[in-house]
Image (cartoon, coloured by chain):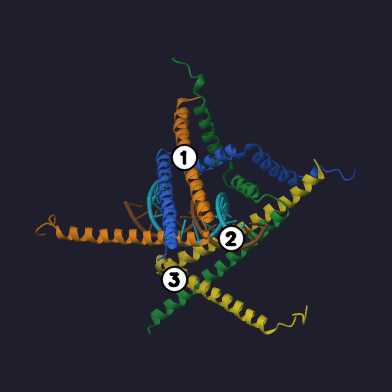
Chain colours: A green, B orange, C blue, D yellow, E cyan, F brown
Amino acid sequence: MSHVVNVAGDRLLSFVERIFHLDDEIRSLNEDKKEIMAEAKSAGFDLKILREVLRIMKQDKDDKDERESLLDAYLSAIEAAKKPKDVPKAA
Amino acid sequence: MSHVVNVAGDRLLSFVERIFHLDDEIRSLNEDKKEIMAEAKSAGFDLKILREVLRIMKQDKDDKDERESLLDAYLSAIEAAKKPKDVPKAA
Amino acid sequence: MSHVVNVAGDRLLSFVERIFHLDDEIRSLNEDKKEIMAEAKSAGFDLKILREVLRIMKQDKDDKDERESLLDAYLSAIEAAKKPKDVPKAA
Amino acid sequence: MSHVVNVAGDRLLSFVERIFHLDDEIRSLNEDKKEIMAEAKSAGFDLKILREVLRIMKQDKDDKDERESLLDAYLSAIEAAKKPKDVPKAA
DNA sequence: AACGTTGAAATAGTTC
DNA sequence: GAACTATTTCAACGTT
C-alpha cells in the first residue's frame, strides 16, 4: 500500500468524520426544535399558525422590503385584473 | 393604473386561476379515492394490506417503466450505431 | 378455487384498477400544474413569490376570518411582549 | 392590553426566539459543512463520490442503529419474561 | 449567472 | 391525538 493512498485515505477519513460530527450536531438541534414546537403545542398554541408566524418573521428579517413589495405588487396586480370595470371605452 | 401592470396582472390572474382549477380537480379525485377506500373497507378488505398491494403494484409498474426506457435507450443506441453515415471518410 | 375467493378477487381487482386510474389522472394534473408554473417562470414571474400568492389566496378562501385573526393575535402578542416599557410600576 | 395576552405573548416570543436561535446555529453548521466539502474538493476529491460515501455510511449507521434497537427490544422482552414476579398468586 | 436536477427537510393529510 | 405516509418545498450542485 503506497503512502500516497494512505495519506489520501487519512484525509478522506478526516473529512468524513468532520461531516458526520456536524450532522450529529444538526440532528440534535433539529430535535431541540421539535421539542420546542411540542412544548408550544401543549401550551395551547396552534402549530400551523405558529409556523406561519415564524415564516413571516424570518422573511421580515431577511429582505423585508424587496420581498414584501414584490408580493404586494403581485396581489395588487391580481386585484386590478379582477376588476376591469372602470376602463373607459376609448381615449 | 398602468397598462403594464394590468397586463401582467391579467397573466398572473390567469396562472392563479388555472392552478386553482387544477387543485380543485385534484382534490375531487382524492375524495373519490377516499370513497373507494371506504367502500373497500366496508366490503371487508383490510386497508393497510390494500395500500400495501397498491404500493407494490405501483413499484412494479415503475420498475417496468424504467426497464422499458432503458431498453429504448439501448435500442436507440444500437440503431444509431447502425447508421454512421455522417462520419467523414478521412481527416 | 372457491367462488368466494374469486368474487373477492374480482372486487379487489376492481378497487385496485379504479384507484390506479384515479392516480393516473392526478399525476397528469400535477404535471399540468408544473407546466403552468414553468410557463409563469418563463413569463418572468418569481416562482417563490407566486407560491406565496397561491398560499395566501387559498387561505383567504378557506377560512379568512378565523385564520387571519389568530395570526394577527399571535403577531400582536409578540409585539406587545417585545415592548414592555409602558407598563406602570404598580396599579 | 390584558395581562392574559401579555403573558401569552411572552411565552410566544420565547418560543420564537429559541427557534430562531437554533436556526442560526443550524445555518452556521451547514456553512461549516460547505466549507469542508469545498476543502475536500480542492484536495482533489470528487464531491459526487464523497456524497455517495457519506450517504452509504449514514445508511449503514442507521441500519446498525435499527438492528441494535431491535436487539434491545428482544433482550428486554426476554428479561421481562424471566421475571414474572408481580403476578398475583390467586384471584 | 440562470437553468434544471437532485437529494434532503418540512409540511399536510390520513389512519387508527 | 399520536404515528405514519405522501406531498411539497427548499437548498446545493453541476451545466450551459
Label number found at residue B19: 1
Name the amino acid, label 1.
Ile
Parent chain of label 3: D
At which x and y percent is residue F3? 60, 63
Residue at figure coordinates x 54%, y 54% from the top left: B42
The residue at 42%/81% (across/down) is A6
- For label 3, the SS is helix
Query: Which residue is labeled 3 in the image?
Result: D53
- Amino acid type, callout 3: Val
Gap in Å between the C-alphas at discs 3 and 1?
A: 40 Å
Mark in the foreground, 3 or 1: 1
| Residue C46 at least partly seen | no
Q: Is residue C60 above or below residue B64?
A: above
Q: Residues within 10 Å of mark 1 (few under 14, many from 20)?
A: many
Q: Picture coordinates of residue C2 (x, y %)? A: 42, 64
| Residue at image mark 2 | D26
**Measuring 77% from the left and 80% from the top, which residue is drawn there?**
D88
Q: Is residue A65 above or below residue A5?
A: above
Have a look at marks 2 and 1 and say if they share a chain.
Answer: no
Residue found at the very far left of the displayed protein: B89
**Residue D62 place in picture, x, y as percent:** 52, 71
